[in-house]
Amino acid sequence: MAKFGTVAVVTKREVMDTSTRMAQGGIASVFDQLDSFDLHIQDTLAAGDGLCNRDVVEMVVKNGPDRIRELINLGARFNIKGEKAADGESLNLDLGREGGHSQKRIVHAQDMTGMEIERVLVGHVKNHERITLFEDHIAIDLITISKRMKRGLITTTHEDYCCGAYVLDRNADRVKTFCAQITLLATGGAGKVYLYTSNPDIATGDGIAMAYRAGATVANLEFVQFHPTCLYHSEAKNFLISEAVRGEGGVLIDAAGNAFMQKYDPQKDLACRDVVARAIDNELKKSGDDFVFLDISHKDSGFIQNRFPNLYEKCRSFGFDMTAEPIPVVPAAHYMCGGVATDIYGRTDLKQLYAIGETACTGLHGANRLASNSLIEALVYADTAAKQNIKDIKTLSADYIPDPPPWDEVGTTDSDEHIMVSHNWDEIRRFMWNYVGIVRSDKRLERAKRRIEITQKEINDYYWDFRVSADLIELRNIATVAELIIKCARHRKESRGLHYNIAYPHRDDQRWQKDTVIRRPFVG
Ligand SMILES: Cc1cc2nc3c(=O)[nH]c(=O)nc-3n(C[C@H](O)[C@H](O)[C@H](O)COP(=O)(O)OP(=O)(O)OC[C@H]3O[C@@H](n4cnc5c(N)ncnc54)[C@H](O)[C@@H]3O)c2cc1C
C-alpha cells in the first residue's frame, strides 16, 4: 500500500508483541509433489465441518504458494531439504505434517516460523519511508461518519463509512485522532476473554469489539478453538505443551494418577485435539480440580531431553522435570475462528473498513480451523485486501475529507478505582471459562448471559466517567467480545465443529448449516 499512499501502522505494544511471533508449527501450503490444491481444499473443508465458504477456501489455498514465495523473496528463511534451488519455482522446502492434513505441507522455520515472518516484515516496515510505525498506541474506537452525524457535526448523503480511529498514545497519555481513507483491522485474536489461553496479552479482541460498535457485522464467534495442553503454572501464562509429547507416548492422568482418555476415544491420548480438550474439561468439571497431568516420565530421560529440548528446559525453569514426574496441564483458548465478517477481498460491510488475520471471519475456517491455516489466511488476505484497497481509493468521491472532531473527554476524571477494572477483568475470564468454554449447556450459557449483562452495565457506567486508559479499553473490549460469544453460542442449537452443547450433541444441517451473524442495531 505504501507505493500508493502513506501508511500508519498502529500497534498497542511493541511491534513484535503478537500471536504471529508465537506461531511455532508453520504455514500450510501446497508444495509437495504428492500434494495438490484439491487435497488442501478437501482437508480444510473437512475440518470446517460444513461451514467453510468454498470460494474462499479455493482462493486462499491457490494463492498460498505465491505468498510464501513472496516472503522468501523478501528475505524469509524457511527450512529446506538439502541445498536451496536457485529459481523460486523449484523450492526444496522441508515440509512438515500436522493433524488433519492428508499431506506434508507445513512450511516452517524450525519451530519459530512466526518469529521469522515478523523479523522480515517488521524489518521492511521500519525501513520504508512512507510507513510510520506507532508503537504503544492503542486504538480505542473507529470513527464513522454516522457518529459524526449523531453529534450534529456534519450533514451528508453518504452511506456510513469508516474514516479512521481514535488512538491512545500510552506514553504521552493522550488520545490522538488518526484520519484515513482506508482503515484495516489486523488486531489478532481474543484468547484473553478466557481464563486460560495460549495467546499473548494483546489478544483482547479489540478489532472485533471496535468493528461491532461501529456497526460492522461480526460472525461465528461461538467457534473458539481450545488447545488441549498448556502448562499450568501461575507464571507460565501461555506456554503450550506440544501435541508431539502425546505423539511420543505421553499419557494424560488425573490427580490420583489414573489415565482417563480410554473412556473418551478408542485412540486414547492420540485422539484429535477437540476430543482431548473436551475430555480434560469433563474430568476437571467432575473433580473440581484446576488441572490434570501429562506424564511422559516412563520414557528414557535422554530421549525426552533430545526430542524436546526446548520444552524440557522451559518446564525445568518452572520447577518441573518432565523426565522424572508428570507435568500439570490445562486446556487453553487458542484460536478464534469467528470475527469481523468480510468478503473475499477482506472488506467488511462498513465502507472503507477492512479486516484481515485472526480478527476477521473470512469463511476459510468454518466451524473449526485446520492447523497452520491461519498464517496462510493472513498472508493471502493481506495481499488481496491491499490490491482491493488500491482500487477502492481510486473510487473515493472528490468531497471525501476525513476531518473528525478530537476525542471528547469533557467531564471525565482520573480513575481512583483500579480494583474495579481488575475485578471485572478476572470475573469475565473466569465465567467465560466455566460457562462458555469447551463444553457448553443451555443452563451455563444462560448463567453467563446474566453475568455479562451485569458486568457490562458496571463497565459502561464506569467507562464514561473516567479518563480512558489502556486497561479500561481492553476491559470494555473483552466484555463486548464475551457478550458476542455468548450470543452466538446461545443462538446455535446444535453441536458442530468447535461448538459443543450437551443439550444438542449432534450436527443439524437442515437448520444450522449457516453462519451466525450479528450486527449492532443502529443507536441514533
Ligand atoms: C502459541 C501460538 C501458536 C500458534 N501456532 C500457529 C502455527 O503454527 N500456524 C498457524 O498458522 N497459526 C498459528 N497460530 C495462530 C496464528 O499465530 C495467529 O492466528 C496469527 O498469527 C494472527 O495474526 P494477526 O496478524 O491476525 O494477529 P497478531 O499477530 O496477534 O497481531 C495483532 C496486532 O494487533 C495489535 N493490536 C491489537 N489490538 C490493538 C488495538 N486496540 N490498538 C492497536 N493495536 C492493536 C497488537 O498489538 C498486534 O500487533 C498460533 C497462535 C498461538 C497463540
Image (cartoon, rainbow, N blue to C red):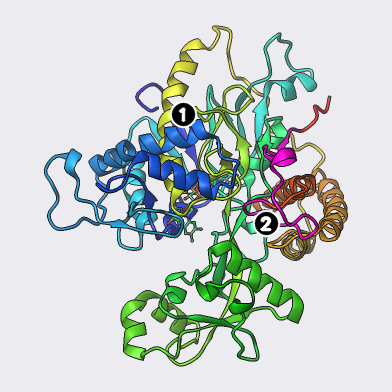
Circle 2 residue = 193
| Residue at 75%, 39% in the rendered image | 511
- Residue at (68%, 37%) from the top-left corner? 514
Residue nearest the viewer, comparing 139 with 220: 220
- Segment tinted magenta in the rendering: 496-519
Q: Is residue 385 left or right of residue 219?
A: left
Q: Element type at marker 1?
A: helix
Residue at (12, 54) in percent of width and height: 83
Estimate the x, y position of residue 249 in percent, counting from the top left: 44, 80
The C terminus sits in image quarter: top right
User: In which image quadrant can residue 149 be found?
Assistant: top right
Q: Nearer the viewer, residue 480 or 332?
A: 332
Is residue 499 rendered magenta in the image?
yes
Q: Amino acid at mark 1?
A: Ala
Q: Is residue 512 left or right of residue 229?
A: right
- CA–CA distance between discs 1 and 2? 28 Å
Across and down, in percent, residue 308 comes to 37, 77
In the rendered structure, are the residues bearing label 1 and label 2 in contact, judged by CB atoms less than 8 Å apart?
no
Q: Compared to 279, does 312 lie above or below?
A: below
| Residue 233 visible in image | no
Badge 2 amino acid = Val
Does residue 346 appear to the left or right of 173 in the view shown? left
**Residue 439 appears at what percent x and percent y?**
72, 62
Of the 4 image quadrants, the one containing the N terminus is: top left
